Image (spheres, coloured by chain):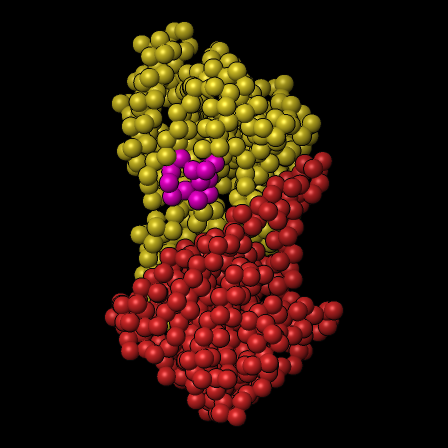
Chain colours: A red, B yellow
């Protein structure tokens, strides 16, 4: 299954905008490349496009075998022929986010002034809104004036909210799943653990590891492990592992013993093969900076005033990273400006990760919402 | 305030038992040193002793200036003349736990066969019960047949439970605070993040950092930061920091920006001065292994059958590390064997850390319980 390719060798479908992208930090990214995948067919009036926004460590390989890991697409259960996001009906696009490492401009792409070197930590600090602006370039390139829907979970949900706030006229329907309108102090703290672990790795070389031909694998693995705990509920961790010992007789201090430890280590070590450490720093920082209300005089409702977009908010009951209360706050803000909003809390004990897993109630809700919106959009 | 002393230079009051200690792992620790502090006066019939069991990263300096940090004792608000644990009335003892680094035998004490070297990672794997057995030696040394009370929070609460299970006749009253009868999969996972971060530090040298004259400071700091997040509630983190930026204009990827980050970094870096990395590995492992029910045919009630000890269980409503449900499960087990048990959930939004903070309801509950027990014990 595994292609044996390394992160740097892998080629991605992409398009480059030579005029670059003006960023929130005030800098201009001199040239913007957006890597993407698409599924299904764009109809004649270009009205059936769904943009999927991916989460922190995912990428554009939504519904096909991943070129590096050989694993199925991360939303294979949701996107495909006859599935909730039906590729027989919709033209589905997913772009690697700005700052990512799967082909879109990011810390591992060539530096604008020293093209034989990657940007590394010289890559500008970016925001969720910058990611959305990069996606908008791609959408315009396809000649799409209005997206039928923008859908995404976790950081993808943040992008959905930013799309709806920045370009309401381009978004007919918006589905932020397991999302939040800002990153909480606890969320920032967990990210900071990961960043400190990466910075503490002797192979980090202040972000210039690429020049040394190494990667800060152990630090990045610790970052991934930390994040992974926050993606699972206590119940999911317990169900998966409980307190099962691997080698109950081997009572030593440094050896592996609990199954949960080996699992985390596996999560960490498989991750470092497919992710760039500087991308991790850049993207986590973008999430931390996200605070939609703060950009609208402290009132989230102001972000959506007059919006005609149809919203479906989905949360999962055991998600403690982006808990239901966060989605409810968004629903309240939308209600206060009389927006069209549905809000569903799915009962699940799988934690934040539930949006990626087999959750029939979520999938049925999504199918139903899209069917209703398609009727309203006269998308036959 | 700061003494300027290093961890290794600091001297502690201690007693050594040359016959050593038989451990759960089957090994004999050839010589056992227990460092301790005491407050108040032991009465003539030696019936007024209270043993305080400390948490993971605390030590025996309960109610006096810490010799290394110059800070007040960690339970200064609870222990002292006229305070809930009244040193005018009780003889209060606290011992550094087995495996610790403040004078009790642990990875940084001299190796039994190579006394010019510390044990390091050769120090045996220990359990919470081993810690209790070491404390029992100290209590017997004082000629105390029965402790009036054993009190402790977090890992200290685990020790209280182990005391009550192992030596019920020696414990008149037991107060496990913010405790649990086992370490959950999530708890183990958070510890494992810390251990991986320590192991990933280039200055760890597979635990032989002492031979190189260095310490794995950055890894240990990441471990401390991770643990620290679990000690605070989301509300406490938000109240302390919210999303306040330190330098809002400085939009770079690697620079500090959120106050919560600087705070965590401070927590991490001040910790490494007073704590040994191998101790951290040893003690977190002991916590992970703790599962009182598993040692009693899977039924926690069996641990306490026939117990005459008077229990006060205390939990805090916003503690997500050792949540109320864990204390309630202990209360249920005690009730099922008709033990004498009170259980109080204190409403607090300070998270697990609440047991160390100014919580008047908790302090009043503790005072009242001890007063009642003193009456029953005819301690006048």
Task: Please tell me which residue is depicted at 67% across the width and 32% down the height of the picture.
Answer: B114
Q: Tell me: residue B161, above or below residue A89.
A: above
Task: Please tell me which residue is depicted at 53% across the width and 44% down the height of the picture.
Answer: B187
| Residue B177 quadrant | top left
Q: Residue A237 in magenta?
A: no
Task: Please tell me which residue is depicted at 31% across the width and 30% down the height of the picture.
Answer: B363
Toward the viewer: A181 or B212?
A181
- In the image, the segment drawn in magenta is B315-327
Toward the viewer: A156 or B188?
A156
How many numbered badges does the structure rendering display?
A: 0
Q: Looking at the picture, how far across and down is residue B32, in whole percent?
A: 59, 24
| Residue B282 quadrant | top right
Q: Looking at the picture, how far across and down is residue B123, in whole percent?
A: 63, 35
Q: Looking at the picture, how far across and down is residue A93, in whole percent?
A: 54, 80
**In this rendering, would B147 be left or right of A210?**
left
Answer yes or no: is residue B210 visible: no
Answer yes or no: is residue A188 visible: yes
Q: Looking at the picture, how far across and down is residue A68, in whole percent?
A: 67, 72
Task: Please tell me which residue is depicted at 43% across the width and 82% down the height of the picture.
Answer: A377
């Amino acid at each position: 299954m595994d292609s044996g390719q390394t992160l740097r060798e892998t080629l991605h479908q992409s398009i480059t905008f030579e005029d670059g992208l003006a960023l929130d930090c005030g800098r201009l990214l001199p040239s913007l490349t957006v890597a993407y995948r698409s599924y299904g067919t764009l109809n004649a009036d270009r009205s059936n496009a769904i943009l999927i926004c991916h989460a922190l460590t995912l990428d554009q390989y939504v519904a096909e075998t991943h070129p590096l890991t050989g694993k199925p697409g991360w939303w294979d259960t949701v996107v495909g022929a006859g599935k909730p996001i039906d590729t027989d009906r919709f033209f589905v696009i997913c772009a690697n986010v700005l700052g990512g490492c799967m082909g879109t401009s990011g810390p591992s792409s060539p530096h604008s002034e020293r093209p034989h070197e990657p940007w590394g930590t010289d890559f500008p600090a970016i925001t969720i809104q910058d990611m959305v602006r990069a996606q908008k370039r791609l959408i315009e390139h396809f000649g799409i004036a209005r997206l039928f829907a923008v859908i995404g979970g976790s950081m993808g949900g943040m992008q959905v909210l930013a799309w709806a706030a920045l370009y309401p006229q381009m978004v007919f329907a918006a589905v932020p799943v397991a999302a939040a309108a800002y990153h909480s102090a606890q969320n920032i703290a967990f990210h900071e653990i990961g960043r400190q672990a990466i910075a503490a790795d002797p192979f980090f070389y202040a972000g210039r590891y690429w020049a040394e031909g190494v990667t800060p694998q152990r630090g990045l693995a610790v970052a991934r492990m930390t994040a992974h705990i926050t993606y699972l509920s206590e119940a999911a961790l317990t169900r998966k592992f409980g307190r099962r010992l691997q080698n109950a007789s081997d009572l030593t201090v440094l050896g592996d013993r609990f199954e949960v430890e080996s699992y985390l280590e596996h999560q960490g070590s498989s991750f470092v093969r497919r992710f760039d450490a500087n991308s991790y720093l850049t993207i986590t920082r973008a999430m931390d900076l996200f605070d939609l209300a703060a950009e609208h005089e402290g009132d989230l409702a102001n972000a959506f005033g007059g919006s005609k977009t149809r919203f479906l908010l989905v949360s999962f009951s055991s998600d403690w990273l982006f808990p239901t209360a966060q989605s409810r706050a968004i629903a309240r803000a939308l209600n206060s400006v009389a927006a069209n909003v549905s809000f569903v809390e799915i009962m699940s004990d799988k934690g934040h990760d539930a949006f990626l897993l087999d959750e029939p109630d979520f999938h049925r809700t999504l199918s139903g919402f899209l069917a209703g919106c398609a009727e309203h959009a006269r998308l036959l």
